[in-house]
Image (cartoon, grey):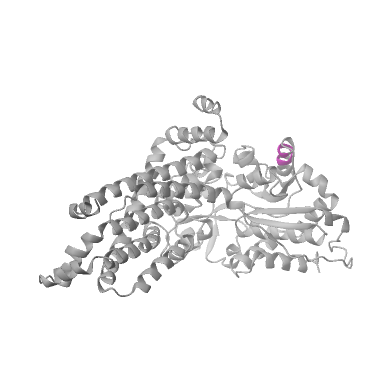
Amino acid sequence: MRIDQTRVRVLLAALAALALTLGIAACGGGSDTSSSETSEEGGSGAAIQSNPENGKVSLTIGSKNFPEQEVLGEIYAQALTAAGYKVKSALNLGSETVALKAVKTGQISGYPEYASTALTSFFGLEPEEVPSDATEAWEKANEEFEKEGLQAFEPTPFASANAVGTTTATAKKYGLKTVSDLEGVSEKLSLYGSPECRQRIDCLAGLEKLYGLKFKSFTPVDISLRYTVLEKGQADLSILFTTDPQLSAEKDKFVILEDDKHVFPAGNIIFVTKKSVAEEAGPDYEKTILQVQEGLTLKVMQELDARVELEKETPKAAAKAYLESAEYIE
Amino acid sequence: MAKGESAVNLPHPVLASFGGAVEFIFTPQTSNVTGGNKVGGFDKSLELVLKHLEVTVIALAIALIVALPLGLYLGHRGKGELFAVGIGNAGRAIPELAVIALVAVLIGVGLQTVAPALAILGIAPILVNTYVGVHQVDPAAVEAARGMGMSELDIMRKVELPLAVPTVMGGVRAAAIVIIATATIAPLAGVETLGDFIINRNVYGENGLLAGAILVALLALTIEGLLALLQSRLTSDGLKLKTV
């Protein structure tokens, strides 16, 4: 029996490609209701007050799909739940483009974004044009957001930036302290970074253009492997985040090189939402978000990242621990 | 973007972005996160297509080396159906990204990680189809061969395998398609395939995403066509006549 399967296979091939496209488009799908941890007591001054008025408002808090973002998303979601809102979360948005679109179309109410990313990725600023002052960066971003009917709340105390990292051994061997020190040796060194790093001006493209560096090779990897490739000795240099817990927990193992020409703009978190959503949700929306992010210093954020990335706690549990220890919730 | 404007006249936005994607494949485009560097274009597309092809061919070869002899042997013995089909179906259920992540932690990233991880996906259909194909060969033909004094190895090689070619090739084609489709996640483990266009929407935008999907689909169709051709060359004429 010889059955001609070509037609079927052709169809399957087309379906496979289609499914792939759809699969990626639908990355922002999953959402789960966070349990209601309503605190009704008004004991400590810092505790979030539950307002029964807010029970009529449903909010969906989003975040991008890596640990720091998920923790932030959880913190905001749980705090807003404590304030009496009906809160759902969608903490797996693939990229800022997807997240912004979700805000605009109302699929999510808001999500945390780095002010620097907003300015470079959404509003086309060159990395060196991003203000180093957090408030200035926020004001500039908010101005642009307002033109599109959006709004960004005030920034967090901590800022996060990409950085060129390496092992202490490599840094010692070549005498590396700043990114500029790579001049003359970068040709011998391999660089690993996220797949989109190659093209981005606030990543490899910027290192090449603004520092004039050429690397032996650039290899794209998932950001969750950024330390693995250094540990395995595959990468001489790897793109890390300044909030990475490994940088404080394994201080004698990894170092980051100072970005002396500002290719990697630092970004404080600003919560991006729609103006209409903020008006509908009432004053407690902004108030709660600003209140709970007050405690988010670089050290606290590194600790929270450590709980999730090194100690394998869930973002939900880490967020809850933060909110409880700061006495925002009981 | 002069050429892109013509696409706007198309009746449906999907068709318009289709035009943008085709343009992305052939002409480098601007992107607002690259500091003025152009992205996409024919040279880059070709480079990614070739890399995608390379990964696919290596993964398929590994899958063949593992699954074909095993399926042949099990089918010939008529034993281990549960094993073959079980392994086959379990293979389909393994989340590929998890395999890649695991292998990456063990041996690092790169082609040496991605190719074996993708091969696991290809083993399933080839193993199952080879087993079934060989198992269902007419026992009379096998007995006749044995009666003529053929060794068991010869029976497998000269009787069972040729008779099972259509079914085996069905498995190979299914394996090729699933490997091509999944090779799009390779950029997460150090190998830049067409998935680069699809994963990095921040850089390439919707046009790049669609361009990647179109190229993957075309590549899958091409490979499928070539394998179909190969199948018809490998199938013995006697087998073809039998069905008429």
Q: Position of residue A285 (x, y in %)?
A: 81, 52
- Which residue is nearer to you in this view: A298 or A84? A84
Q: Residue at x 85, y 50 (%)?
A: A283
Q: Residue at x 25, y 53 (%)?
A: B243
Q: Position of residue A146 (x, y in %)?
A: 74, 38
Which residue is most to the front? Answer: B244
B15 magenta-colored:
no
- Which residue is nearer to you in this view: B172 or B76? B76
- Which residue is nearer to you in this view: A112 or B172? B172
Image side of residue A237 versus residue A119, left or right: left
Residue A86 vertical placement versus B198 (above, below): below
Magenta part of the protein: which range?
A: A141-145
- Give the quarter of the image for residue B162: bottom left
Kindly report the secondary structure that dominates the magenta region of the rendered protein.
helix
Residue A222 vertical placement versus B74 (above, below): above
Q: Residue at x 22, y 60 (%)?
A: B163
Image side of residue B158 versus residue A157, left or right: left
